[in-house]
Image (cartoon, coloured by chain):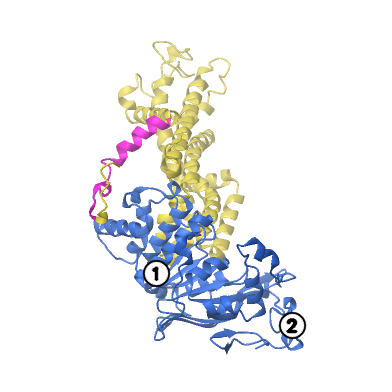
Amino acid sequence: MAEITTDTGVGVRPALARKPSAFLEFFSRLFREKPLGAIGAVVCLIFLFAGIFADLLAPYGFNLIMPINRMKPPSLQFWFGTDNLGRDIFSRILYGARLSVIIGLSAALLATVLSILLGITTGYLGGRFDMIVQRFVDAWMSFPDIVILIVVVSVVGPGMPQVIVVLGCLYGIAGSRIIRSAVISVREQSYIHAAQSIGGTTPRILWYHVLPNVMPPVIVLFTTRVGAVILAEAALSFLGLGVPPPAPTWGGMLTGSARNYMYLAPWMALAPGICLTLVVFSINMFGDALRDLLDPRMRGHR
Amino acid sequence: MSDAMTQERPAEPKATANVILDVEDLKIHFPVYGGLIQKQVGAVKAVDGVSFQVFEGETLGLVGESGCGKSTTGLAVLRMLPVTAGRIVFEGVNITHHDQKQMRPIRRRMQMVYQDPFGSLDPRMTVGEIVGEPLVIHKLHGEKKERRERVMSLLEMVGLRHDMIDRYPHQFSGGQRQRISIARALAVEPRLLICDEPVSALDVSIQAQVVNLFQELQERLGISSIFVAHDLAVVRHVSQRIAVMYLGTIVEISSRDELYANPKHPYTQALMAAIPVANPVIEAARAHQIITGEVPSAQRPPPGCRFHPRCVHAMPICSEQTPELKNHGSSKVACHLF
């Protein structure tokens, strides 16, 4: 601050200049202050790239059946072993990453956006609007998830977009309660009152004051939803309502024939299980780091 | 408090001063619901028939104990609460029934400073964004750079360094935060400032600084203000006229010097007697008049004069007839004694 010692006031410029790149600064802070979060981000990126470039990386096709190599344990030839049909598990994991990560991220994103929209409007506006909308949420949540899924999928047929939309809506509507309760506590803060008395419009207050202040639960909601969605997709695939085979998803690999051969070929379940755990854990760590880094009060803390 | 606190200001506003705010018989009742079908079973009469005026350039102090409706009055003037009855005229415009959209241009003319210096600033915004927000909302100083310079000059006006503009509220102390709050209120050059106990959450030494800042800015900018407080020493220092409230009504309005030298209403007298004297010998020797009993419920205020159950001068008429706020000398008192 040595350069700002003059007393001329308004004319002094140094504070006017913004830092060159907020984006770069964010990443350097991520690695410095939150090493675990940084590792999480890197792991997520690795899986994302593995999914995107599965065609180039996979040593075998995801549905290439090699009857001679059935249920081979992990080896140099088959890194994660082979399944009961003699398909290379490593290749299937790579292709599965594509589907699982896409489904996980997009359904969780849809769910979070839905939760924010519902939670912020009902929580902030309150009153009769809140009453009515939340009774619909009650009704929706009182249905068993699986019933809604079966109905929707039997009408439109199984497939990835359906799975994303259905899971997104399921988790989004239920999650709106969490956002709503956070909004209600923020709404009573006097800075919201101040913004109203200044003359701020409701959309403006929601966007600039309410949303940033409910970001911590939003981020946590999103990261936990990613894992939940990947697992829910596995349950759907198990019922034959998910992404239809032979397309590999981690959930499908985990719940399908892997169960029947649990004792003969444990690696069939181990590989997708470990990958699932790793991705969910990494996203959670990254989400936690993100939450702390975005909070101005946490600046300079570990 | 510091030397500046003892500097007296001219007690009376200029005789020709214009009325900037005229509040007439204002009532704010909060409905109370009960029973199975949530029927309205009563109302908390937070403000029940309050009339006062604020003149151009003057500060009206609003004092009273907690729950007497002084903050509610302030919020009602800003039209942040539904008005049950009465009339609020600001700069000649009747704003009693304005909706939020109609209020928007008027909000530029009246601003508020809050009590809680820790809750009233959005923790996720920088000081520049906070102080600049009213400018954005009212589309003043549209260009970003221009706005930033305006915010910097505002920060200097309230005694902060302009290079603090990119800091966040949590990096400031209570007194500094209150300065930021003042800067935000002054950003749009309002004519009326409503201060809801702006210093009661601060240390006494910081209180003096912030109070002095208020005075200095007000003299410089000629802003009128309503200063809500329960601290009589602070109110005496900042206001030219003072209204004393009790249970939703004004019991006495008069000029500061008159009120402190010659309090008329028994409640005001008791309040004045409760101010401790700095000299312990005098303090020990002087007579203490203590108000007994509790403040009655605002949902079921006592009939007649609201103060009569606790008043030492209570007469039969007090419980039957509500005293009106009448001129008595240079002040107005609502008491059957006068």
| Residue behind mark 1 | B218
Residue shown at 41% from the left, 34% from the top: A101
Kind of residue indicated by mark 2 = Ala
- Regarding mark 2 in the picture, which secondary structure is present there? loop
Span shown in magenta:
A11-34
Task: Locate residue A290, reporting x and y percent.
Answer: 43, 38
Splitting the image into 4 quarters, where does residue B86 fall?
bottom right
Say left or right for B57 vs B233.
left
Q: Which of A213 and A66 is in front in this view?
A: A213
Say left or right for A18 vs B89.
left
- Regarding mark 1 in the picture, which secondary structure is present there? helix
Kind of residue indicated by mark 1 = Gln
> Tag 2, which chain?
B
> Tag 1, which chain?
B
Residue shown at 33% from the left, 57% from the top: B156
Circle 2 packing at 10 Å, graded few (<14), some (14-19), many (20+), is some
| Residue behind mark 2 | B314
Chain B rendering hue: blue
**C-alpha separation, residue under disc 2 versus residue under disc 1:** 41 Å
Circle 1 packing at 10 Å, graded few (<14), some (14-19), many (20+), is some
Q: Does the magenta stretch include residue A52?
A: no
Figure chain in yellow: A
Q: Can residue B234 be seen in this view?
A: yes
| Main secondary-structure element of the magenta-colored stretch | helix
Q: Are marks 2 and 1 in contact (CB under 8 Å)?
A: no
Task: Locate residue A150, reporting x and y percent.
Answer: 54, 44
Q: Can residue A247 be seen in this view?
A: no
Q: Is residue A16 magenta?
A: yes
Q: Which of B87 and A47 is in front in this view?
A: B87
